[in-house]
Image: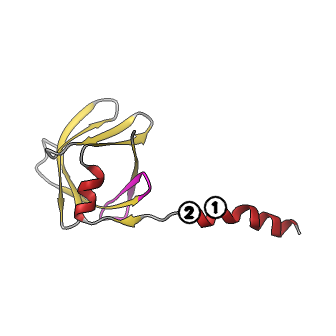
């Protein structure tokens, strides 16, 4: 009987759980423009509509961002190479996925 009680206790979690979904280019623009992502431990990033981005992880760095072929792309000087990522969303969590499958999650800040 305990086993069934545990299953019914956990069941609502399964019903309310959402999955990450892949965003299109327009959805990436809508999700990120004029937003701030909190990556935890005092690390955050902003994305403005002028396609500039600020990243803070103990110090500031500034770069550019764009959307190309339904992917988020960023450029961080002094490099002139753009790095592009697939973007997924689950509620207020944005996930960036690089070409090797590594992920970085950020939460949309209030």
For image coordinates 29% across by 29% down, the residue present is 59
* Few, some or many residues within 10 Å of mark 2 (<14, 14–19, 20+): few
Instruction: In this rendered view, identify the residue nearer to me: 19 or 58.
Output: 19
x then y, percent, for residue 28: 27, 58
Marks counted in the figure total 2
Q: Give above or below for 50 relative to 28.
A: above
Task: Left or right? Give the position of 34 relative to 82.
Answer: right
Circles 2 and 1: CB atoms closer than 8 Å: yes
Callout 2: SS: loop
In reply to whether residue 93 is colored magenta, the answer given is: yes
Q: Residue reaching furthest right?
A: 1
x then y, percent, for residue 96: 34, 57
Query: Which part of the image, by quadrant, shows the N terminus?
Result: bottom right
* Few, some or many residues within 10 Å of mark 1 (<14, 14–19, 20+): few
Task: Left or right? Give the position of 93 relative to 60.
Answer: right
In reply to whether residue 84 is colored magenta, the answer given is: no
For image coordinates 23% across by 66% down, the residue present is 70
Region rendered in magenta? 90-103
Query: Which part of the image, by quadrant, shows the C terminus?
Result: top left
Q: Give above or below for 30 relative to 52.
A: below
Q: Which residue is mark 1?
A: 13
Residue 109 position by quadrant = top left
Rendered image: mark on residue 17: 2
């Amino acid at each position: 009987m305990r086993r069934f009680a545990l299953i019914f206790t956990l069941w609502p979690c399964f019903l309310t759980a959402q999955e990450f979904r892949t965003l299109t280019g327009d959805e990436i623009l809508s999700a990120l423009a004029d937003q701030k992502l909190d990556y935890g431990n005092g690390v955050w990033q902003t994305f403005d509509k002028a396609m500039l981005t600020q990243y803070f992880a103990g110090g500031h760095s500034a770069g550019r961002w764009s959307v190309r072929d339904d992917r988020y792309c960023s450029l961080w000087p002094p490099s002139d190479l753009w790095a592009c990522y697939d973007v997924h969303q689950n509620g207020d969590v944005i996930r960036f996925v690089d070409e090797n499958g590594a992920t970085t999650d950020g939460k949309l800040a209030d």
